[in-house]
Amino acid sequence: MGSSAVSEERKQLGALLRGVVKVLVVSDPPDYDQPWQTQGAESSTGSGVIVETARGLRILTNAHCVQDHVYVEVRRYGRSKKHVATVEAIGHECDLALLSVDDDVFFQGVTPMAVGPVPELGDTVSVCGFPVGGERVSITRGIVSRIDLVRYEQSQRMLLALQIDAAINSGNSGGPVVRGNQLVGIAFQALEDAEQVGYVIAGPVVTHFLEDVARDGRTGFPALGACVQPLESRSHRAFLGLPEDRAGGVLVRRVDWGGAAWGVLEEGDVLLSVDGVPIQADGTVPLREGELVDFSHLFSRRFVGEAANATIYRNGSIIDCVLPLRPPRPLVPEERYDVRPSYYIFGGLLFVPLSKNYLKTYGDPWWQTAPRDLLQLYEEGSLSADYREPVVLQKVLADQVNQGYHDLESMLVDSVNDRPVGDLRELIEIVESAEGRFLDVVAHDGRRVVIDRAEASSRQQFIFDLFGVPEDRSPDLLPGAPDAANPANPADPVELDEAEQDAGDSISAGARISQLPS
């Protein structure tokens, strides 16, 4: 490369670096072991990049860099002054956040980075940011070695990502990954126990997030809402009666209540194509020429509220149908951020909803040390109209009213006073409307906890004073408070509009033939 070319490249890189930002965060994460309090303030740093949005210039960074934040500052490359920033939008599902700065001086002289196309395999990219090891900006280069759907650690969703061999270390999170003068992704995680294996949030995911924000809200990434399995076995395909000219498709083995497929697909259907894109028997679809990804990409690239056209095979017929796109809603939510834990206490009995945050109180490796019945619900449980949220008797705040139960913990609740418990709000309603002398709590494994209702009420304040509990419940469970059980899914997924209900009814009647620390 000639000296003029090198000089031009350095000039271009210098212009890009003016848009690179260091993000400094003070956070106060919740304490899921004592859900009425927090763990205390802690500091961390990450990286970001200035981009143009429908709302003006903003800083794009990782959601995990600013999760549970109480104070955020930013500092541009080459400048010493720190500016207070506000988290304007956050998408934990895609691990992206947008920050705003009120002081216009912060953005002076910067050219925002534009999101470019997905690079090709073998392309060279540069990772810019502020990793550990120094205070100044760092630039590393690497090769794009893989383009695929990757499980995002922040949400466990499978979304499009780039794998590169450039170093991505603590502090790089949220930093821009560039090719030429364009942003091709955001650094966000690295493979443990491996050298030089980093992952980058792909440009289309970034664009999806920015478009969501421009629509005055964060609706997230839709999913099929069904469990499927590949159909590569010729015997299995013959058993289902699939025509020989239908070489692809995946078998629907479970439909999730309230999801996109609810009321449209059925167990035993074969999903053949989505939006005209054939699904291969191994569950893959083309991303580009010669590049295959999991078919779930066909849903996650779309927007919540849209509809997808699907073709299925059912009982010897080829059926066209419409899937109203909704976000996933698991029975046990993945890790939650920026919200305080839900809890309810009566007579020293501490009730909480089951979540991944709760399971992680068992420490690493929580997936081995947490109770098996709770892990099974997390891994395999499915939502239903009557079972919306598993409730756990987490522990007992010891007092004379609950004597004999002080060692109980992590007890999965089935019923209270012979009434099934569908979620924590329902448990509260049962407890507070109960009549008679006793409160009888029955666990999934048959254990029972029986306490005297009147004595429990009279001892309540004494227990709270002893254990430093401010209220008998979290603020989200106060009368009139919105249901925060699934913050990523604000709308009740079973409230179908008329068009969606008609689509579901028509299919049921036979229809018409034709998914880094900072």
Image (tube, rainbow, N blue to C red):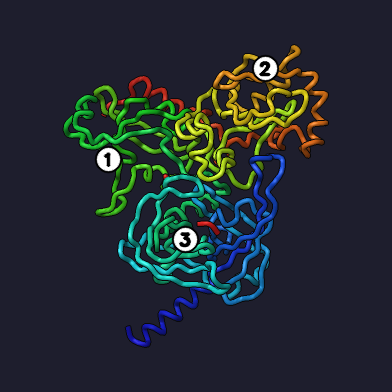
Q: Please tell me whether residue 346 is drawn above or below residue 327 in the rendered image.
A: above
**What amino acid type is highlighted by mark number 1?**
Asp
Q: Which residue lies furthest to the left in this view?
A: 244
Q: How crowded is mark 2: few (under 14 residues within 10 Å), some or many (20 or more)?
A: some
Indicate the quadrant containing the C terminus: top left, top right, bottom left or bottom right: bottom right
Q: How far apart are marks 1 and 2 (CA)?
A: 50 Å
Query: Is 238 on the left or on the right of 250, as rendered?
Result: left
Q: Residue furthest top?
A: 436
Write down the residue under mark 1: 282
Residue drawn at the location 62% of the way across and 55% of the way down: 88
Mark 2: which secondary structure? strand
**What amino acid type is highlighted by mark number 2?**
Asp
Indicate the quadrant containing the N terminus: top left, top right, bottom left or bottom right: bottom left
Find residue 440 and name its label.
2
**Percent x, y of residue 42:** 66, 57
Write down the residue under mark 3: 187
Q: Could you tell me if the residues under marks 1 and 2 are in contact, i.e. CB atoms within 8 Å?
A: no
Residue drawn at the location 33% of the way across and 41% of the way down: 275
